Image (cartoon, helix red, strand yellow):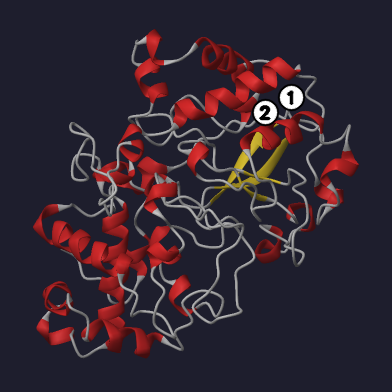
C-alpha cells in the first residue's frame, strides 16, 4: 500500500510560541530536570536513566527498569534525538494502489501514539509505576520546589503562581519540551546528510549500494522517507503505524490498538526515525531483536523462516504485503545493514568521555529560527497556559 501523507503542521504553526529569553531559560531548566534523580520514588531515576546520550538518547537494555526494584517497562525506550520533530497525532486519509481510501493514524508520541505531542508525553513517565513512580502531581511539585534549580523555575512560573502545584508542573513540562527542541537533538550532521548535500565521498561503496536497496528492492522508503514533509530536512520516517510481526517478548502488547480500540490496529507501533539507529540497539518495540543485521534478515525472510523468530503477539494484523519476503540477496542485506551507519550523527560519535551531552553542530538553525516547524501547541489548551 502507498501512503500519501500531508500532515497539517502549518495549520498549527501559527500557534507555536516564540523562543525568546523565557524559552531559553526554560530549556536550561529542562536540562536540569532531565538529569534530576530526585524526581522519582524512590529517588535515583531520571529521564537520562532510560535515555542515554551515548546510545542516541535511547536505552541499550531491551526494556528499562523502573525506580522500584523489580519493576520494569514493557517497551524499549526510543531515542529522543529528533523526537521534538515528530508530528502531532492526526487521523489521516491515504489511498492504496487501487485508489481505495482509508484512514490511518500518523504521528504522536510514545511507540503506541497515546500522547498527542511532546507536551503530553513528558508528563507520563513521572507517574508511571513502572518508571519514575511518583504518587501524584502534588509530590512532583513539592520536589521541584526543593530542587537546586527551583529559583530559575520560579522565575518561569511567577511568584504569584509558585504556590500552585499545577502551575509549577506545567512550567516544568514546558521546560522539558524546550530542552528537547535544542539544536543538540537535531544536528542533521550524519554522513548521509553530507552525501545528500553533494559530497559523494561521504558514503562508502557498500553504503551507496545499500542506499539503492533502501530505495528500490527493499522499498524501505515507503515508511522511512528520504524526502521532506513536516521539516526542512529528511526525518527518515513517516511516523505511521504498522504491525511488523516483531517476536513476542513478555506480556502481550496491543500497541496503537490498545487505546484506539480498533482491532485492525492491534500490535501496531510507530515507525521510528532511522537517524542514529546504529546506536540504539536492541530493536523493535520490545527490544526483541539484538542487532541491525538481524533486523534486516527479519524483514527479508520473516515469512520464509518463521521458526527462527518465534511467535508474534497479534499475527492477524501483521503486514505481510510490504515485508517478510523481500527477496534480497545476502549481499544486499549486508549493504543495507552497512547503510545504517551512515545515518549516525557525527556530534554523537564525537562525544568525549567527560561529556554529559553532545555538542550542537555549529550552524544548526536555532529553535527560534525553526519555531514554526515544531508540532508544539497542545500546552495552550492547559488551564495554566498564559499568552506571552
Question: Image check: 315 left or right of 22?
Answer: right
Q: Residues within 10 Å of mark 1 (few under 14, many from 20)?
A: few
Tell me if I can see residue 218 in this picture: no
Element carrying mark 1? loop
First-in-chain label (2 vs 1): 2
Q: How many marks?
A: 2
Q: Nearer the viewer, residue 381 or 236?
A: 236
Q: Residues within 10 Å of mark 2 (few under 14, many from 20)?
A: few
Q: Residue at x 39, y 85 (%)?
A: 137
Q: Quadrant of the C terminus?
A: bottom left
Q: Residue at x 46, y 77 (%)?
A: 132
Q: Provide residue 346's location: percent of width, then percent of height.
A: 34, 32
Q: Provide residue 307's location: percent of width, then percent of height.
A: 90, 43
Residue reaching furthest front? 353
Q: Provide residue 182's location: percent of width, then percent of height.
A: 26, 49
Q: Quadrant of residue 327?
A: top right
Q: Quadrant of the N terminus?
A: top right
Question: Image check: 140 left or right of 209?
Answer: left
Q: Is residue 215 above or below residue 2?
A: above
Q: Which residue is mark 1?
A: 97
Q: CA distance from mark 2 to mark 1?
A: 6 Å
Q: Nearer the viewer, residue 368 or 206?
A: 206
Q: Which residue is mark 2?
A: 2
Q: Is residue 136 above or below residue 286?
A: below
Element carrying mark 2? loop
Q: Is residue 145 above or below residue 111?
A: below
Q: Are marks 2 and 1 in contact (CB under 8 Å)?
A: yes
Question: Image check: 131 left or right of 218?
Answer: left
Tell me if I can see residue 64 in this picture: yes
Q: Residue at x 36, y 68 (%)?
A: 381
Amino acid at each position: 500500500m502507498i501512503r500519501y501523507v500531508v500532515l497539517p503542521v502549518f495549520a498549527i504553526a501559527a500557534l507555536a510560541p516564540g523562543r525568546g529569553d523565557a524559552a531559553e531559560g526554560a530549556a536550561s531548566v529542562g536540562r536540569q530536570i532531565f538529569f534530576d534523580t530526585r524526581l522519582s520514588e524512590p529517588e535515583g531515576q531520571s529521564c537520562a536513566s532510560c535515555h542515554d546520550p551515548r546510545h542516541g538518547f535511547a536505552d541499550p537494555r531491551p526494556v528499562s527498569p523502573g525506580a522500584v526494584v523489580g519493576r520494569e517497562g514493557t517497551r524499549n525506550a526510543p531515542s529522543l534525538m529528533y523526537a521534538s520533530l515528530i508530528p502531532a497525532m492526526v487521523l489521516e486519509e491515504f489511498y492504496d494502489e487501487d485508489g481505495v481510501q482509508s484512514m490511518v493514524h500518523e504521528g504522536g508520541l510514545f511507540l503506541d501514539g497515546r500522547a498527542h505531542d511532546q507536551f503530553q508525553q513528558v508528563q507520563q513517565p513521572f507517574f508511571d509505576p513502572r518508571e519514575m513512580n511518583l504518587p501524584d502531581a502534588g509530590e512532583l511539585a513539592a520536589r521541584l520546589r526543593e530542587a537546586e534549580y527551583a529559583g530559575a523555575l520560579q522565575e518561569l512560573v511567577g511568584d504569584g503562581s509558585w504556590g500552585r502545584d499545577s502551575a509549577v508542573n506545567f512550567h516544568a513540562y514546558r521546560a522539558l519540551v524546550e530542552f528537547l527542541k535544542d539544536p543538540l537533538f537535531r544536528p542533521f550532521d550524519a554522513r548521509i546528510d553530507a552525501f545528500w548535500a553533494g559530497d559523494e565521498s561521504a558514503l562508502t561503496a557498500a553504503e551507496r549500494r545499500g542506499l539503492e536497496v533502501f530505495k528500490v528492492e527493499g522499498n524501505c522508503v515507503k515508511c522511512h522517507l528520504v524526502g521532506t514533509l513536516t521539516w526542512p530536512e529528511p526525518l527518515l520516517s513517516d511516523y505511521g503505524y504498522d504491525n511488523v510481526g516483531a517476536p513476542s517478548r513478555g506480556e502481550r502488547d496491543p500497541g496503537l490498538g490498545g487505546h484506539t480500540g480498533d482491532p485492525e490496529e492491534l500490535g501496531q507501533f510507530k515507525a521510528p526515525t532511522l537517524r542514529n539507529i546504529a546506536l540504539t540497539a536492541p530493536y523493535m518495540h520490545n527490544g526483541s531483536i539484538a542487532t541491525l543485521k538481524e533486523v534486516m534478515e527479519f524483514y527479508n525472510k520473516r515469512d520464509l523462516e518463521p521458526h527462527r523468530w518465534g511467535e508474534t503477539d497479534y499475527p492477524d494484523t501483521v503486514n505481510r504485503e510490504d515485508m517478510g519476503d523481500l527477496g534480497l540477496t545476502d549481499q544486499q542485506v549486508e549493504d543495507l545493514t552497512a547503510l545504517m551507519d551512515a545515518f549516525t550523527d557525527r556530534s554523537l560519535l564525537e562525544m568525549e568521555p567527560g561529556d554529559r551531552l553532545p555538542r550542537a553542530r555549529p550552524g544548526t538553525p536555532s529553535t527560534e529560527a525553526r519555531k514554526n516547524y515544531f508540532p508544539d501547541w497542545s500546552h495552550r489548551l492547559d488551564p495554566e497556559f498564559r499568552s506571552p
